[in-house]
Image (cartoon, rainbow, N blue to C red):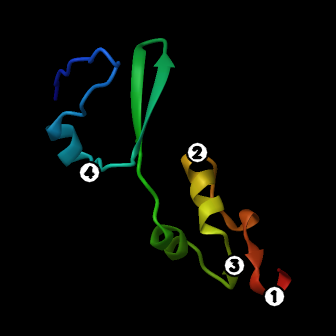
């Protein structure tokens, strides 16, 4: 699928609707622009919710959802190393 968009004077553009629908791109998702030898590669990082974080963890852990969202948005792995056991606060 090929689609074109125009760059505005403010260097903004629109994600074409067919791509928004196909990849479920929503407000606050992040577009990563990656410079490669072949040209620009675009990655979409989905906005993460508290439910996404809580649903991906098993065990008796406490976590700071704001901290985990920031880590996720920076592309960091979210795993048990980043959490504390509830009885070890």
Residue topped by disc 1: 87
Q: Secondary structure at mark 1?
A: helix
Residue topped by disc 4: 24
Give the side of residue 5 with respect to residue 57, left or right: left
Image location (x, y in percent) of residue 27 = 32, 49
Above or below residue 63? Residue 21 is above
Above or below residue 23? Residue 56 is below
Residue topped by disc 2: 75
Image location (x, y in percent) of residue 59 = 65, 83
Image location (x, y in percent) of residue 49 = 46, 65
Alpha carbon separation for disc pair 1 and 4: 39 Å
Give the side of residue 20 with respect to residue 29, left or right: left
Judge by depth and name the residue closer to the eye, 8 or 84. Answer: 8
Q: Quick one: label 3 or label 1, which is nearer the N terminus? A: 3
Q: Residue furthest front?
A: 10
Q: Quick one: label 1 or label 4, which is nearer the N terminus? A: 4
Q: Quick one: label 2 or label 1, which is nearer the N terminus? A: 2
Q: Quick one: label 2 or label 4, which is nearer the N terminus? A: 4
Could you tell me which residue is drawn at 46 percent across and 73 percent down? 51
Q: Is the C terminus in the top left, top right, bottom left or bottom right quadrant?
A: bottom right
């Amino acid at each position: 699928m090929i689609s074109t968009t125009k760059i505005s004077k403010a260097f903004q553009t629109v994600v074409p609707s067919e791509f928004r629908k196909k990849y479920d791109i929503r407000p606050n998702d992040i577009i990563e622009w990656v410079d490669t030898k072949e040209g620009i590669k675009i990655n979409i990082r989905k906005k993460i919710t508290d439910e996404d974080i809580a649903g991906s963890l098993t065990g008796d852990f406490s976590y700071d959802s704001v901290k985990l969202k920031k880590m996720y948005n920076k592309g960091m792995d979210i795993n048990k190393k980043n959490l504390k056991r509830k009885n070890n606060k």
